[in-house]
Image (spheres, rainbow, N blue to C red):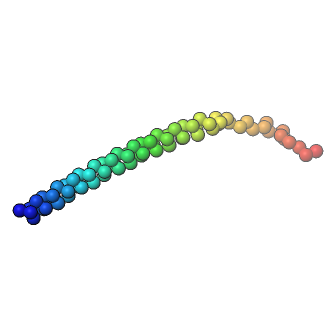
Amino acid sequence: EAAQRWLARGEGSLTTAASQYSAQQNVERNVNQARTAADMQAEELNKRQYVEGQPAYQEQTMPQSGTQPYTDR
């Protein structure tokens, strides 16, 4: 009878430990998912800010043929 009680206590401890371990895994998974989502949002924001900070492309005009834009004389 004492052995049965001892085994029952051990099983209860094992069950408790397993459920705590499972809960901890769920917490870690949720934290990792939240970090991933936050990282993706931050990356998108950084991309937008970089693009907005770039000057708009303007086509360069070529000098008219026969003229020199700079002479050394």
Q: In which quarter of the image is the N terminus?
A: bottom left
Residue at 13% across / 62% down in the picture?
A: 6
Q: Quadrant of residue 8?
A: bottom left
The number of numbered badges drawn on the structure is 0
Instruction: Determine the residue located farthest toward the left in the rendered image.
Output: 1
Considering every residue shown, the one lying at the far right of the view is 73
Q: Where is residue 60 in the image (x, y as percent from the top left)?
A: 71, 37
Q: Residue at x 35, y 50 (%)?
A: 28
**Residue at image coords 9%, 64%:** 3
Quadrant of the drawing holding the C terminus: top right
Spot occupied by residue 29 in the image (x, y as percentages of width and height)? 34, 49
Residue closest to the eye, 63 or 33? 33
Work out which residue is located at the far front of the displayed protein and give it. Answer: 2
Give coordinates of residue 25: x percent, y percent. Answer: 31, 52
In which image quadrant can residue 14 be found? bottom left
Q: Is residue 57 left or right of residue 8?
A: right
Measuring 73% from the left and 36% from the top, which residue is drawn there?
61
Q: Outermost residue toward the bottom? A: 3
Nearest to the observer: residue 26 or residue 21: 21
Q: Where is residue 62 in the image (x, y as percent from the top left)?
A: 75, 38
In the image, is 28 to the left or to the right of 15? right
Using residue 21 as the reference point, say whether residue 55 is left or right of it.
right
